[in-house]
Amino acid sequence: MAFTIGDLIEHAVDLMPDRTAVESGDRSRTYAELEARSNALAHHLRSLGVQPGDRVGLYSRNTIESIEAMVAIFKARAVMVNVNYRYVEAELDHIFSDSGMTVLIHERQYSTRVCNVLSNRDETGGVRPVVAHRVVIPDGSDVEIGTLAAPVLYDDAIAGESIERDFEERSDDDLYMLYTGGTTGKPKGVVWRQG
C-alpha cells in the first residue's frame, strides 16, 4: 500500500467519517463529505481525459474547494501543479506552458487573468499554453468566466459524477509540482514525490 495524501484521506474517512475535516468561516465538510466531493471531481477530471501523470493546475487561495480539488487531483493520480494566487500574467503564462498542465482549476476571481494568458502567445516561442479545460471555483465574485479552455463551474463539474472510491492503486512515486519564487528569473518547477 502506498502512503499518499489520497491514502491518508481515505484512512481518515474509514476511521471517522462524520468528524469535521475542514472548516472555513461558517462552512465545513466532514471527512465523508470531503471524500465524496473529491471523488466526484476526480471522476470529472478522468472524464476530461486526465490520466495518471498528467498535470492539473490548482490556482486558488486556501478554501474548502481547493482542499477538495487537491485531494481529487491526487486520487486521479495526476500531478498537482500549485499555482500561487499572487502570480501576474507573465508568470502564469510561463507556468501554464512550462508545466504542461492540461486542466486548470481556479477561483472565479482569476478568470480574467487566466483568459488573458490563454489568449496570448508565449513570448518565448509562440506556443500557446496547453490548458484545454478549466474548472471554476465559486468565490462570491461575479467576474465573467469567459469561454476559453472549455470552462465549467465547480458544482456543475461534480454534479452527477460518481462518488465511488474506485480509482487504481496509488504509488509512493505519485508526484506534485511546486514552482519556486523565481527570484533569479522565471519560476522553476520542482517535482516532489508524495510518498
Image: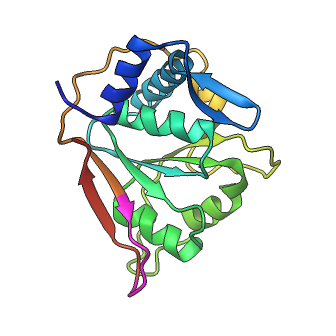
Q: Position of residue 114 (x, y in %)?
A: 61, 60
Considering every residue shown, the one lying at the far bottom of the view is 184
The vertical placement of 127 against 182, above or below, is above
Query: Observer-nearest residue: 166 or 195?
Result: 195
The vertical placement of 79 against 100, above or below, is above
Q: Position of residue 117 (x, y in %)?
A: 57, 66
Is 187 placed left or right of 62 in the picture? Answer: left
Q: Position of residue 3 (x, y in %)?
A: 23, 32
Query: Observer-nearest residue: 33 or 112?
Result: 33
Is residue 179 inside the magenta stretch? yes
Q: Residue at x 55, y 12 (%)?
A: 18
Q: Residue at x 31, y 26 (%)?
A: 7
Q: How is the image coloured?
A: rainbow
Q: Residue at x 70, y 60 (%)?
A: 112
Q: Please state the extent of the stretch shown in magenta in the rendering.
A: 178-185
The answer to which image quadrant residue 26 occupies is top right
Instruction: For the N terminus, give its image quadrant.
Output: top left
Is residue 88 inside the magenta stretch? no
The answer to which image quadrant residue 126 occupies is bottom left
Q: Position of residue 54 (x, y in %)?
A: 31, 44
Is 60 placed left or right of 171 in the picture? Answer: right
